[in-house]
Image (cartoon, rainbow, N blue to C red):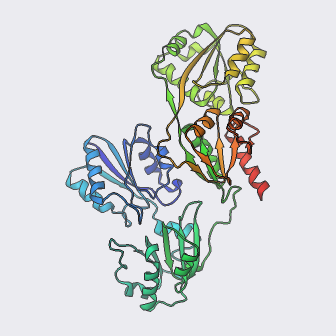
Amino acid sequence: MGVVYLVGAGCGDYDLITMRGYELLKKCDVLVYDSLIDSKFLDFVKDTCEKIPVGKRAGQKSAKQEDINNILVTKAKENNIVVRLKGGDPFVFGRGGEEIISLKENNIPYEVVPGITSSVAVPELSGIPVTHRKTARSFTVITGHTKDDLLPENMEHFAKLKGTLVFLMGLNNIEKITQSLIANGKEKSTPSAVISNGATKNQVVVKGTLENIAEKVKENNVKSPAIITVGETSSYDFSRTIKLPLDNTTVTVTGTKRFSEKLQQKLYEKGASVTHLNYLKVEKYNQNRNLENALKNLSDYSLIVLTSINGAEIFFEKLIEYKIDVRKLSNIKFAVIGSGTAKTMENHGIIPDLVPAEFTSLALGNLIAKTYENGKVLILRAEKGSKDLTEVLSKNNIDYDDIKTYDVINSSKSMEKEVTTDYITFASSSGVEEFFKNNFTISERTKIVSIGNITSKSLLKHNVKDFITSQVADTNGLLSAIINDVKFRK
């Protein structure tokens, strides 16, 4: 028998989830998730995790609650660790109780992990406190949406309350809600606000009074998901005053999961809203006789070349798999491309001997040729690795084995094909090739950022001429290129 964890994802951006929830995501076998969650949560689970979307977005088709209950029970009975990831908190209009009743009826072990509820956090992050001394001593959370699209019950009671009223899922009913509150005695001039896409970089806040907020929502074309607040604190502005260099900047990141996660985090910390266009997947070559023979005969080599973080990680994984003692590496030198690959080596206790100043295969080949003494070179890299490296070695009569340990493949089945963000980044030539091969397009407003000259050459092959090339071929280089361009545009 498996288990089910009902996890509150928090509201808005992914980093508002609890640490307990994050750890459960990393180990679950099945993820059953709402549509109102940050897509980055899907990157936290194992590659083997089964991901089951169940909708629950207002106004759109979604799974029936009974079907969701059945999925949880069925997957748990298949001996899985199941995470039911719910927006906000499971028990604040999240139907967590209904799911637990079903689990109890079927004797499924479960646990609830609280989440930050949008009823407090969304107004708070937009600068509206739901309570404030001498202004609002209480707040009331109300569902603004019912199955039959009716008004919430007890509107007469709510109209008489002195504290802050917070309506969830009520945007479609905003006219009915405001008119009913006024009809039941609430002052027309009562400050009111609507926060759309709260707790994200795409947040929109519209403020007004109970009398005109519905009209302002129409004028500003405010969309769900949104929260309505009514009360004196709605006029406050306690929003953050710390400014970040990429505030209000949207970026699409392409590339493999490992590289993209690193770049995403750096962009996010600088204020950007980031989307990962996850069409590239690393496929390791598990049955690799050439690699096995090479690693079991390490004494044949004087230098090992690793051109990427993925290649370095696979190298150490295979040492363990083939039970090869790392002490056999004591007389072997290492050459790598990039600070990230060098850092990966250092994390495993090895300081690379050769790291070119320019992070390209050509620069590494020239550095090896310049410093080469004798012996055989072992190159471990991707299937579509640049020919520049081996051409330089061959030209200098350096003996080498070039072994492919993984491939970067396409996984773009059901993705939106047009990129409309402010920027899009490309981290490899293969990434560019797969992008255009799979008919992705880039809007005229989107600025393209290339990680280096080889990637830029691939863009030129596809008649893309207007792009930025980062001065340093790593995540920091891409980040700096975007920040500098944003400053220039301002």
Q: Position of residue 208 (x, y in %)?
A: 58, 81
- Looking at the image, which is closer to me, 117 or 384? 384
Residue under the image location 62 percent in, 72 percent down? 238
74 up-or-down from 348: above or below = below
Q: Is residue 16 left or right of residue 79?
A: right
Q: Quadrant of the C terminus?
A: bottom right
410 up-or-down from 22: above or below = above
Q: Is residue 144 left or right of residue 131?
A: left
Q: Position of residue 52 (x, y in %)?
A: 37, 48
Residue under the image location 57 percent in, 15 percent down? 327
Query: Which quadrant of the structure image shows residue 342?
Result: top right
Residue under the image location 59 percent in, 8 percent down? 299
Q: Is residue 333 left or right of residue 45?
A: right
Q: Is residue 85 left or right of residue 68?
A: right
Q: Position of residue 206 (x, y in %)?
A: 58, 74
Residue under the image location 68 percent in, 31 percent down? 338
143 up-or-down from 432: above or below = below
Is residue 133 visible in the rendered structure shown here? no
